[in-house]
């Protein structure tokens, strides 16, 4: 620890802390633009100049004392950028003197004079770091007031400002205003350091420096990264803006709610900004244990669907047509429809993003009814709870991580944590102001340590770039791979060396983590071997489950009892679905209650009752992420009519059946979870005892499988800008395509769990032969379909 | 004359060494180099051992000749020992400071001297690899250095187990591509690694984590060449020249309207008068200002006081300027100081890397614009005060010394020739072309 | 065909100079610049692919250095030093003469494809001001009107730079003992 005096306060901070963090820790403020949490400090903006001094030792080895007998402080001749200055024991920092104020106000002036004064039309206005710091640190009257009775000068710069591209479209999601850019380099450092996608860089030099990305054909640019949106959060000015939220509102008009993203199993913290009942923007919420300050593009930009085409009132089928009714009338219709249906033949199915409260209501009701038909959408064949979960901190601490799958798409935050692992970062220390803003442990351009990572996936995955050994395999070969890692069998051809390296690294590492994708969890034989491997090596496991709350819902017992139909199967006589199931499932039931946010052709054709559902953004409750961490959901004020969650809908259902609803209110469920289920407090990790599981028999591999490969996007998000970016294509290697008579660019129709789909054929070099690939866009990820290509199209 | 320290080129005891071979036919070949005792210093250094070499250089008082004047031996002693890591010596041959051109001829005409200097440094810091970062425009210097390295390699003066001593050394040449900032040592390292040449944060200092994160020392061409002669002739010989704190000799460069502009090797402490009159033959037209050590040094007025100032680090600081690289530029009276400073400012503005705010917005943006305003006759009352005030805001607050280097000459000019600036502003007079006598 | 396809030996030799491949970026850019007169987007892409860098990274480095050209240049790219000592020596007038003579500005190429011009910063030949550098060749020093004319004429005739006879005095390096040496 180092003792540091900031102005009049003396504090202790860990050695190596930056002077900037020491100042904040002491409760003083210092202006900054280029420093940012989780990024390397670079000392570029020079806003944080402070005066520093240190005691000195005399020739006798003791401190030179001042007239008061205290160690005399020798002040440095030049001001220092506090973000890149490490504290030393006995250091003194001055942030209040005229010298410091003069430097800071000068830097504000320099920063401002090429910055346009278009705050009234800038989306950042009101939440702009440059605005705030200009008010607080610029224009110190002492230096800018020419005379006692004269007005202070607002700027001494009376020349034309730099005029450059103001509306530069970086991608469908992000727009760049080059005039507003103050060259803090946060965005460039972010891309290099955090996701490792070097898609943005400074071009030119000096005053002509600007940021740019690669132009593709037709002067179009994209930012090929799953994490591009984070730069809009960290841009200190309005240079990088979220196009999906552009001009939707002023910052002070938004109603902002901090909640949890249910887009994947990471449990990322988000801030949802709404205005007049519309969800307009999503930003990252800092949750240092989980997503730090970053979210995936799917979690950020995929929100427009929430505002469009919602089911706002219950509907019942009368004379073959769906008509809007009240909840009471819907309940009466349910009561009538369920008459004569045995309670044990009613199925209850929740979406994968259901809260623990909803899961509890479903489990309790199913038990009351005695029905084995209960499940949640996206549950994997092997439960995630079969494995002892690792935490993200444990992941950073691991000596070796073996990945089977594609974290960048399945649970994108894991990609970012693996980025930290390969950069050798440890969890940041905690100071009184939270995460260090200028963490000197983080460096620019750190070479990645490849000895910590091995990755195997059914197609070339992004993270292979940081893996010491990696390989692609045919979907379905996971068990063979794991057998080789266990020393139980031959390695698949071509992967011998890579697997041998991974096996050795696993054996020699004390602390290792396995990361299992949906392809492993859905292949029972592979999952069994993965469990053996975990037990043998003592490795903890992160399961990349398709369902956001898989661990939580599994722990509550929301899976079929003996004889019950799984979410992938048809079976029950009457069903409650919290989502739109497959046509086969709808067709086979006699009475269908669909609790939906959106209708589609299938639901309109088959539903007997449709209840308006909440999106995860509108729910209050709790969820459990892939680490087993309990996280909160807070309702965002989105206009959804009479929509209500599954707790209420299941209570309506129970009453219609004629049983007392075991859970009627969310709050009641929350209480039950704490008392009966001993659920830890928020942010705590739920110690779920690894479930024993009976491996079900693997279903035979289709002869020509279409592998439903993971993508971070979900089907319902494909609207607006997202629809322009996410291209759904049937991908195949040229050999496979030739074998099936498929031509690049042809349109074919496929039978998928979501119904018949028209997709374009895309030939991709380097894909394993023996399978075709289709983005899963939802819960069926990691499974293979039999390729039933219905109509061959022409190019 | 023959008593006390040597502070004049006219002193009979003064022996030119660095440039002794420059201009001689075939001076760049290995045979020529060997014919006058080449590669004897490195053999001697190997026999002395690493610590003794550092001690000798420390004792000589040699200070970095790249402009900053940091003691070379001290720099070498900062290098960690026996780390088991690869150490590097990088030679800064990105000579880009306007007014400086001494290293060019050292490389063109005496490349083996530099190779030997790099070897001695390599021995002193346990580096087996040396990178010569040569400015991209120096084509002839590059060709000669390449030829010399090849020749040395072929004939066993570079490589493994040199002279049977077990000492190993290899040199690679990396060409710059037109960026003054690469003369800043950490920017040079970034440039060598294939990055944008932004300066790096210090600490970590290059001696801790330099090229590719490994311990590295960066020295100027002239410093390394001086080390050869220090080892060969001894620290006492070197220290017999110069003043108390500025030891040895140095290459001074003269440009501007003089009879014989060029490079002159003189002891530190020699006066400007000797350099400019005895060596360079005196001015060809009236001179008003003297930039003493490359364009970043504040100009001094052309008068007897300046001309009698000894050229050493301390005397020039006392006069409010700097010795820098020893590149003396004479600014003729026919050229407005506003014009001269406009030119210098434009240079620094063009060369600013754009990393930090004061340099990017201040030097590259505001100062250049303001000079353009004043220089084209659009200046307004108060502009000179703004310029002065701006210098306060930029100087000492930037990331590296480039912004300081841009401020110093302007500040110096405002000190001695303020009236010219005020005149330009008040009369709205555009500056006149300086080189109208070109033809 | 890729530019480096037939230069594998040169590439291997360049890579061998550095512990990391990325350091070969500047030598590779220079190689393209020397051979083709500019570094086209296709070449930038190719270099990126060889080194495992994004095209953005290559462009970021390339645009930082003033030697690499993002636009095609003439067969003879004339670079005129414009910094202080050369300005004192008449670099501005020299530049005007060039513009007049060739009727082009920065970024243009003469119709015959021979010349393009660029003002550059200090070339490190202040004592022989003003100075012109043609492509990557050794400097043309002490450029007077007559020498400039002779230079352009020689280049137009397709002569090699070292074969062109330039009239007048060449600059010199002067030794302190008074012996003048021709540079």
Image: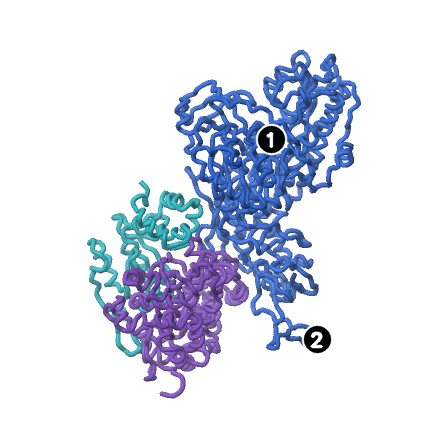
Chain colours: A blue, B purple, C cyan
Chain letter belonging to callout 1: A
Secondary structure category for the residue under label 2 = loop
Q: Along the polypeptide, which appears first: circle 1 or circle 2?
A: 2
Residue A249 location, x and y as percent? 62, 40
Q: Nearer the viewer, residue A653 or B101?
A: A653
Q: Secondary structure at mark 1?
A: helix
Residue B438 numbered tag: none
Which residue lies under the disc numbered 2?
A: A68
Front one among A193 and A420: A420
Q: Is residue A374 left or right of residue A413?
A: right
On the image, the x and y values in percent for residue A677 come to 75, 34
Q: Residues within 10 Å of mark 1 (few under 14, many from 20)?
A: some
The quadrant holding residue A777 is top right
Dot 1 corresponds to which residue?
A305
Kindly report which numbered mark, 1 or 2, lies closer to the viewer in this rendering.
Answer: 2
Q: Answer few, some or many: residues within 10 Å of disc 2's Cα (few below 14, many 20 plus, some between 14 and 19).
A: few
Position of residue B7 in the picture relative to residue C154 (left or right): right
């Amino acid at each position: 620890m180092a003792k540091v005096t900031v102005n009049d306060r003396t504090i202790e901070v860990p050695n190596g802390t930056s002077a900037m963090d020491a100042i904040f820790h002491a409760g003083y403020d210092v202006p900054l633009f280029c420093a940012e949490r989780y990024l390397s400090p670079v000392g570029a903006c020079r806003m944080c100049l402070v005066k520093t001094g240190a005691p000195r030792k005399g020739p006798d080895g003791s401190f030179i004392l001042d007239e008061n007998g205290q160690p005399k402080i020798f002040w440095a001749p030049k001001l220092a950028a506090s973000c890149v200055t490490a504290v030393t024991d006995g250091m003194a920092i001055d942030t209040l003197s005229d010298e410091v104020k003069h430097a800071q106000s000068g830097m504000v002036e320099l920063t401002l004079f090429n910055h346009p004064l278009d705050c009234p039309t800038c989306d950042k206005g009101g939440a702009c770091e440059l605005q705030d710091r200009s008010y607080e640190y610029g224009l110190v009257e002492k230096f800018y007031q020419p005379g006692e009775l004269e007005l202070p000068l607002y700027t001494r710069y009376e020349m034309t400002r730099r005029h450059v591209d103001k509306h530069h479209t970086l991608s469908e999601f992000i727009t760049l205003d080059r005039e507003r850019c103050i060259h803090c380099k946060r965005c460039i450092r972010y891309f290099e350091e955090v996701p490792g996608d070097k898609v943005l860089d400074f071009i030119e030099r000096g005053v002509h420096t600007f940021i740019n990305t690669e132009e593709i054909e037709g002067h179009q640019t994209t930012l090929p990264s799953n994490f591009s949106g984070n730069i809009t959060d960290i841009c200190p000015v309005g240079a990088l803006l979220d196009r999906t939220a552009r001009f939707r509102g002023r910052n002070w008009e938004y109603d902002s709610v901090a909640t949890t993203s249910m887009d994947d199993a990471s449990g990322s913290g988000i801030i949802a900004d709404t205005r007049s009942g519309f969800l307009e923007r999503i930003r990252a919420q800092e949750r240092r244990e989980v997503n730090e300050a970053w979210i995936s593009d799917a979690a950020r930009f995929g929100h427009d669907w929430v505002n469009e085409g919602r089911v706002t009132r219950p509907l019942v089928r009368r004379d073959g047509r769906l008509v809007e009714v009240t909840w009471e009338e819907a309940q009466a219709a349910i009561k009538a429809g369920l008459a004569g249906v045995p309670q044990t033949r009613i199925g209850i199915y929740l979406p994968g993003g259901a809260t623990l409260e909803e899961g509890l209501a479903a489990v309790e009701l199913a038990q009351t009814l005695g029905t084995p038909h209960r499940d949640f959408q996206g549950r994997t064949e092997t439960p995630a709870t079969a494995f002892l979960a690792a935490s993200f901190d444990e992941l950073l601490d691991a000596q070796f991580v073996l990945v089977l799958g594609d974290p960048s798409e399945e649970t994108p935050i894991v990609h970012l944590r693996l980025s930290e692992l390969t950069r050798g970062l440890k969890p940041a220390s905690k100071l009184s102001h939270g995460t260090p803003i200028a963490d000197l442990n983080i460096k620019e351009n750190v070479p990645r340590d490849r000895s910590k990572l091995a990755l195997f996936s059914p197609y070339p995955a992004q993270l292979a770039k940081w893996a010491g050994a990696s390989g692609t395999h045919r979907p379905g070969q996971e068990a063979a791979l794991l057998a080789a890692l266990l020393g139980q069998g031959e390695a698949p051809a071509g992967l011998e060396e890579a697997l041998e390296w991974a096996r050795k690294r696993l054996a020699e590492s004390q602390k290792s983590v396995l990361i299992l994708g949906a392809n492993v969890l859905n292949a029972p034989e592979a999952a069994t071997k993965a469990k053996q491997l975990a037990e043998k090596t003592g490795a903890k496991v992160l399961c990349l489950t398709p369902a956001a709350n898989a661990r939580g819902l599994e722990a509550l017992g929301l899976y079929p009892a003996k004889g019950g139909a799984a979410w992938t199967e048809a079976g029950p006589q009457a069903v409650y679905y919290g989502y739109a199931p497959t046509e086969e499932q709808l067709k086979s039931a006699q009475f269908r209650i669909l609790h939906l946010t959106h209708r589609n052709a299938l639901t309109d054709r088959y539903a007997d009752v449709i209840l308006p559902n909440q999106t995860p953004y509108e729910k209050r409750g709790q969820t459990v992420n892939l680490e087993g961490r309990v996280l909160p959901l807070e309702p965002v004020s989105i206009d959804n009519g009479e929509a209500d969650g599954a707790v209420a809908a299941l209570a309506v259902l129970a009453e219609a059946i004629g049983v007392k609803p075991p859970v009627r209110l969310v709050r009641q469920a929350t209480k039950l979870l704490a008392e009966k289920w001993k659920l830890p407090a928020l942010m705590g990790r739920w110690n779920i005892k690894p479930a024993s599981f009976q491996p079900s028999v693997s279903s035979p591999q289709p002869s020509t499988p279409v592998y439903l490969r993971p993508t971070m996007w979900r089907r319902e998000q494909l609207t607006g800008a997202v629809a322009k970016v996410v291209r759904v294509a049937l991908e195949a290697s040229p050999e496979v395509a030739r074998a099936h008579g498929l031509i690049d660019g042809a349109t074919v129709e496929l039978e998928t769990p979501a119904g018949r789909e028209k997709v374009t054929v895309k030939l991709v070099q380097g894909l394993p032969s023996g399978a075709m690939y289709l983005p899963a866009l939802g819960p069926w990820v990691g499974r293979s379909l039999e390729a039933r290509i219905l109509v061959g199209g022409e190019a | 004359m023959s008593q006390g320290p040597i502070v004049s080129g006219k002193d009979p005891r003064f022996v030119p060494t660095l440039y002794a071979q420059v201009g001689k036919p075939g001076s760049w070949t290995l045979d020529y180099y060997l014919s006058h005792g080449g590669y004897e210093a490195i053999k001697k250094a190997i026999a002395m051992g690493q610590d003794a070499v550092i001690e000798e250089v420390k004792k000589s008082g040699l200070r970095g000749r790249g402009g900053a004047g940091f003691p070379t031996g001290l720099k070498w002693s900062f290098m960690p020992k026996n780390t088991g890591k690869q150490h590097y010596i990088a030679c800064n041959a990105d000579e880009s400071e306007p007014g400086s051109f001494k290293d060019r001829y050292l490389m063109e005409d005496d490349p083996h001297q530099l190779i030997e200097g790099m070897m001695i440094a390599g021995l002193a810091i346990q580096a087996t690899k040396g990178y010569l970062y040569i400015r991209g425009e120096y084509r002839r210097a590059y060709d000669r250095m390449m030829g010399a390295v090849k020749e040395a390699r072929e004939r066993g003066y570079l490589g493994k187990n040199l002279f049977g001593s077990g000492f190993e050394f290899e040199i690679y040449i990396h060409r710059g591509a037109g960026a003054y900032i690469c003369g800043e040592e950490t920017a040079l390292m970034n440039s060598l690694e294939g990055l944008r040449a932004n300066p790096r944060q210090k600490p970590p200092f290059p001696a801790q984590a330099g090229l590719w994160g490994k311990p590295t020392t960066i020295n100027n061409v002239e410093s390394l060449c001086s080390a050869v002669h220090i080892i060969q002739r001894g620290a006492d010989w070197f220290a017999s020249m110069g003043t108390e704190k500025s030891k040895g000799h140095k290459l001074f460069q003269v440009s501007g309207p003089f009879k014989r502009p060029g490079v002159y090797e003189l002891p530190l402490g020699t006066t400007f008068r000797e350099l400019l009159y005895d060596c360079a033959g005196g001015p060809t037209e009236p001179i008003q200002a003297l930039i003493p050590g490359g364009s970043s040094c504040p100009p001094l007025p052309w008068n007897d006081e300046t001309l009698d100032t000894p050229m050493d680090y301390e005397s020039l600081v006392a006069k409010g300027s700097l010795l820098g690289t020893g590149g003396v530029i004479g600014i003729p009276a026919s050229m407005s100081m506003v014009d001269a400073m406009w030119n210098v400012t434009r240079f620094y503005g063009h060369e600013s890397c754009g990393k930090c705010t004061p340099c990017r917005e201040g030097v590259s943006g505001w100062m250049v614009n303001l000079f353009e305003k004043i220089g084209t006759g659009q200046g307004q009352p108060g502009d000179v005060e703004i310029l002065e005030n701006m210098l306060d805001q930029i100087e000492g607050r930037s990331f590296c010394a480039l912004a300081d280097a841009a401020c110093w000459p302007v500040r110096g000019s405002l000190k001695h020739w303020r009236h010219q600036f005020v005149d330009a502003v008040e009369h709205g007079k555009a500056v006149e072309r300086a080189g109208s006598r070109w033809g | 065909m890729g530019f480096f396809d037939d230069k594998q030996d040169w590439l291997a030799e360049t890579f061998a100079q550095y512990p990391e491949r990325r350091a070969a970026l500047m030598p590779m850019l220079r190689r393209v610049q020397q051979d083709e007169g500019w570094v086209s987007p296709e070449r930038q892409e190719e270099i990126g692919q060889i080194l495992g860098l994004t095209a953005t990274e290559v462009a970021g480095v390339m645009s930082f250095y003033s030697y690499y050209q993002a636009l095609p240049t003439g067969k003879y790219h004339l670079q005129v030093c414009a910094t202080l000592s050369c300005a004192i020596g008449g670099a501005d007038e020299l530049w005007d003469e060039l513009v007049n003579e060739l009727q082009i500005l920065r970024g243009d190429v003469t119709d015959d494809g021979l010349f393009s011009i660029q003002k550059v910063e200090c070339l490190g030949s202040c004592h022989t001001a003003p100075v012109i550098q043609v492509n990557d060749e050794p400097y043309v020093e002490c450029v007077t009107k007559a020498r400039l004319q002779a230079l352009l004429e020689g280049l137009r005739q397709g002569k090699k730079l070292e074969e062109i006879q330039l009239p007048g005095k060449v600059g010199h390096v002067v030794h302190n003992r008074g012996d003048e040496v021709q540079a």
